[in-house]
Amino acid sequence: MTGKLEFSFNSNKIGEFALDKEVMTIGRKEDNDIRIENLAVSGHHAKLLTIFDDSFLEDLNSTNGTFVNGQRITKHPLRSGDVITIGKHELRYLNKNSAAIEDDGEKTVLIRPKATANPPTYPSSVAASSHEVEYEPVKVERSPLETAKLQILNGSGAGKELPLRKASVKLGKAGSEVVQINKRPDGHFIVCLDHESGKTPPRVNGEDIGARARKLENHDVIEINRLKIEYFLAS
């Protein structure tokens, strides 16, 4: 098995993982082969199946989704150069021997693991129910705007989620809201309502919001004082 994944965060390479096992899992919990310690990552987020020179990625019903080249996937055959995005982390798949795939949505693979005296064990969430796994990638449309939500990343409320169902949502302390998020036909836009003198202005991805409304993109991180909140287009 010659494939590997180059692991990076904010365009900075952290390391790489050889795909030297038939089944490898990605997630936040310690029992994963590739562990990503981030609240945006589910305990068992995704798994990789590698058969000879071909690898296949599957989302494990994660909260925030698994993306390949910017598109959300459920099951996906990988080509060398594909970029897997989980939260703000990226895993670039590299394999000079991988077979060319003309149409990802039409490839079906039947996987029959080799019988062994002591078969390997995997987390219950990814264990196959039999010796045959029918793998049939399905093309998935992007999540509708109505599924957008916010997730608190730090502090006592870390992990809490706020669905953006209303046309307008204000964030901040009662009576002193700092920012407002408005839903428009073409997306969610954030605008600064108030900025106390001497305090750090509200930011998105480290940049001051300023006086104009700014469109939010999937996985943008909003900073209000020391609080960090991530914007998701989730399903």
Image (spheres, grey):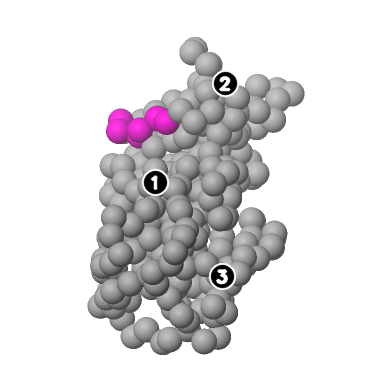
Q: What residue occupies the far top of the structure in this picture? A: 175
Whether residue 88 can be seen here: no
Residue where numbered disc 3 is placed: 20
Q: Which residue is more in the foreground, 63 or 95?
A: 95
User: What range is drawn magenta here?
Assistant: 161-166
x and y percent of residue 182 in the render?
38, 36
Reply above or below: 40 against 71.
above
Looking at the rendered structure, the kind of residue marked 2 is Ser
Could you tell me how far apart the alpha carbons at marks 1 and 2 are, in whole angstroms? Answer: 30 Å
> Which residue is depicted at the point 29% across and 55% down?
129
Q: Which mark is residue 124?
A: 1
Q: How many badges with numbers are in the image?
A: 3
Q: Which residue is more in the foreground, 132 or 234?
A: 132
Q: Secondary structure at mark 3?
A: loop
Q: Secondary structure at mark 2?
A: loop
Residue where numbered disc 2 is placed: 156
Point out the tag, 1 or 2, that comes first from the N-terminus.
1
